[in-house]
Amino acid sequence: MSKKTGDLRELEERWRAYWLDSGVYRYDPTRGRDETFVVDTPPPTVSGSLHIGHVLSYTHTDLVVRYKRMRGFNTYYPMGWDDNGLPTERRVQNVFSVRCDPRLPYDPDLALEFGRKGDVISVSRPNFIELCGRVVEEDEQKFLDLFQRLGLSCDWNEMYATIDERSRYVSQLSFLNLLDKGEVVHRFAPTMWDIDFQSAVAQAEVEDREKDSDFHKIRFGVEDGGDFVIATTRPELLPGCIAVVAHPDDERYKHLFGKNAITPLFHAPVPIVADEKAEPEKGTGILMVCTFGDMTDIEWWRQLDVPPREVIGRDGRILAAEWGAAPWTTVQADAAQTHYDKLVGLPVERARRTVVEMLEGSGAIAGEPEKIRRPVKFFEKGDRPLEFVLSRQWFIPVMNRKRELIEQGRKIEWHPAMFQKRYEDWVEGLNQDWCVSRQRYFGVPIPVWYAIDAEGQIDYGRVLLPRKEDLPIDPSSDAPPGYTSDQRGQPDGFAGDPDVFDTWATSALTPRIPSGWPGDPERHDKVYPTDLRPQAHDIIRTWAFVTITRSYLEDGSVPWRHAAISGFVLDPDRKKMSKSKGNVVLPTAVLDEFGSDGVRYWAASARLGLDATADPNVFREGKRLVTKIRNASRLVLGFEGESGATTHPVDVALLARLRVVIARATDAWEAWNHALALETIEAWFWSDFTDNYLELSKTRAYAGDPSALGTLRAAHNIILRLFAPFVPFVTEEVWNSIRTSPSSIHLERWPSVEELADVSDDGTFEAVVKVLTSVRRTKSEASVSIRWPVDHLEVSGPQAALDLVARGIDDLSAAGNIAAYELKPALELADLETDVQLGEAPEKPAE
RNA sequence: GGGCGGUUAGCUCAGUGGUAGAGCACUGCGCUUACAACGCAGGGGUCGGGGGUUCGAAACCCUCACCGCCCACCA
């Protein structure tokens, strides 16, 4: 590490510590709602890895917060950690080589080491949760360190975790509120189920993956003679067939409606029904309805109102069944049973092959299977296809709320606006209610019990609820009101709901977790609804959707005024980063190499909503800007002498142009375009200020000219404040370099045009720079140094332009080392032309 | 199959009706009392293709191609 980078690191650590100690970013609860800017910060999944994507989106948020703070807002910028949920469980399983067995008793002496290898051991649920707690503690520290190093101006006193007591309280309370209103229901219904995680999953967690499949043609019989052929990719579901469907207008099958088909192998009579959802072009145009292959099967099953024949169990294996006894009706019970017994206990894939073999043996296969690619539903974190199984789950109905939820979305300003459309598309496309229960361990427990009847059977119709003042509770260890612990599992006793909430059911409430809701209404009303929800676009269907939904169902509110959506980070080849490709850019690596400000500059250069490229050149550019700010500051702050009023025409022009920059940058911020604000400021700083103005005014400044000194210092002060939200470390360093006791620039006001006299640049600056540039060009073409003397400069052109040049001719002469000049009117010229007579080689100054 | 973005210099990206831009890269020059980890100057683009609107289109409309993302009941 070079010395300069080392200095940068020291500087960053020093200001990070100062900001923490001095509380510059602290929320002031005494100030009113209208002067407070509130952020509903995304709690990162701490068991995930630190990713450059975090740097992008969290910096975007911090930029806005810093701008708002400088606009005088009291900022409420909390930080949460999403530790609750499956990612943590998976990490614990790997880190400690354990799995959870809820039947085991708690072992208070269990001591396991991080990174433990060897046989997987089973631990009790409370032990498992303890291990989760150990892992998230370590993970959260890593995120905290990254975020503070990045300079996020959160109020670090306002931290929460989605598994902590406060979050469990809010999550359970909100659930009970919805239960009171009938907005959450308990259903025994087909649910999407991951056979590996052994849990229900929600529509929002499901993704389609293209898979190769065989499209098998299977011949069905008809009750009173005849046959037809269906096509399916799921022959193993044949025993679960409850009906056959074709389109009502399909001439090929019209004569069959109303009759029964007879399934091959199992000889089950099933009705042949007409329904418009059957598409004549797909397959053979007639299909089997099974319990359950897909969503449409579920719809048909409900329409037919028949008992299900469940074929696939929760472990993804074929369930046992007794053919001949309802609901397993058949006309040949022995044959059906013989065939079926060969399947029982087999996993889906093997059962599929076995069914096909049996069908071939019985002659019910009608031709070679067709190879097709088709989308298959997977849990986004899962490895095997989802199945639909019947289970008891808690749902928040949303299918009946689509219109209202879209309406709520319209009350939010989305940045960029196109993401509102994506939200609406998602809501319109909902096809299931939101399943909020999960058969997992590390999560917020569902706060209900069920009564057990006199025979010892759980009566799911009698839900026992806790008192809200007792929340949070754990029904697996607490007893419901009116019962004692020894009645657990006993006749006339109770049973706790063993499940936990989906992570999203709790993170849907992030705006009210740190807000004090509902016990501290004064605080809550000051920070809810929030001003800003920042998030990435991939979780619009989850986090944005569930938050809008829960806010609406809870109290009809809209959770935020603005939603700012960040893009993804792509590698320099514009490929999505992934560990397997080895193209992951680590946040710590870029921070080490380019410094916090340099990395923030990169993030700030990326526009909201657009994917960004982790381009080293952009990081480097940021680091260069930091160096430039320090060097320019050293020059400006090194001049000695009293500041005076800005009177020199070049100084006046400079400030007039700065005025425009302030206005434009402020407009850009107000339009949620941080990248444009940065670009505007930086372009002006680099071009007008350092390249030209510093060179032009330098000689007067060294001579102590009050106008030059006053202008330089005023402009420099404003420049630092303009840059402060983007590069908070270097601006703080420079700001304090002329102060005896620290005073944070981040509590200063964002520059306003009112700070500068209401003047506009009449063209002086442009004209003077034009001449300066041509002098530089002449020297460059002559291959001489920029300080090479000019004997005579002749500028010709229209009188008006010459007048402008004349106003800065003294600075021009000094900057160009020009001995003599002539301004020569030339009416025929539209623009300025210059003739530069270079002098003799300058004498080497004596050493 | 539906929807939403994108396509501008070698690269990364700005630019929504009026003379094509920035940074990096490239070429040349230069140690200049803020900065050689730098400065100054320069070369480089038929704005994805085609059609249309307009006095004028990178921009507006239509269409096609390609890239990316989101969604879809997957028989």
Image (cartoon, coloured by chain):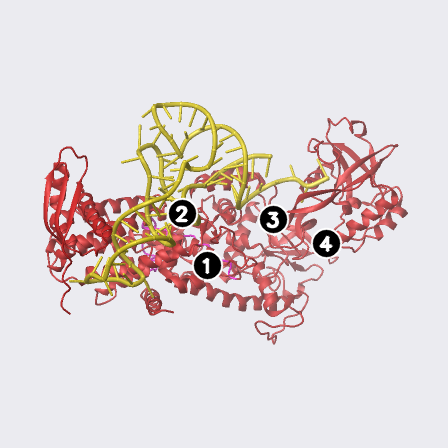
Chain colours: A red, B yellow
Question: In this rendering, which labeled residue sits more in front, label 1 or label 2?
Answer: 2
Examine the structure image and report whether residue A36 is included in the region drawn in magenta.
yes
- Residue position for label 3: A206
| Residue nearest the viewer, comparing A657 with A201 | A657
Q: In this image, A88 relative to A557: left or right? A: right
| Vertical placement of residue A105 versus A735, above or below | below
- Residue position for label 4: A316
Residue visible at 55% across and 55% down in the picture: A503
Mark 1 crowdedness (10 Å alpha carbons): few <14, some 14-19, many ≥20: many
- Residue numbers of the magenta segment: A24-46
- Residue position for label 1: A80
- Residue position for label 2: A607
Question: In this rendering, which labeled residue sits more in front, label 4 or label 1?
Answer: 4
Mark 2 lies on a secondary structure that is loop
| Residue nearest the viewer, comparing A489 with A29 | A29
Mark before the other along the chain sequence, 2 or 4: 4
Mark 3 crowdedness (10 Å alpha carbons): few <14, some 14-19, many ≥20: some
Q: Amino acid at mark 1?
A: Gly
Residue visible at 63% across and 69% down in the picture: A97
Q: Amino acid at mark 2?
A: Arg
Mark before the other along the chain sequence, 2 or 3: 3
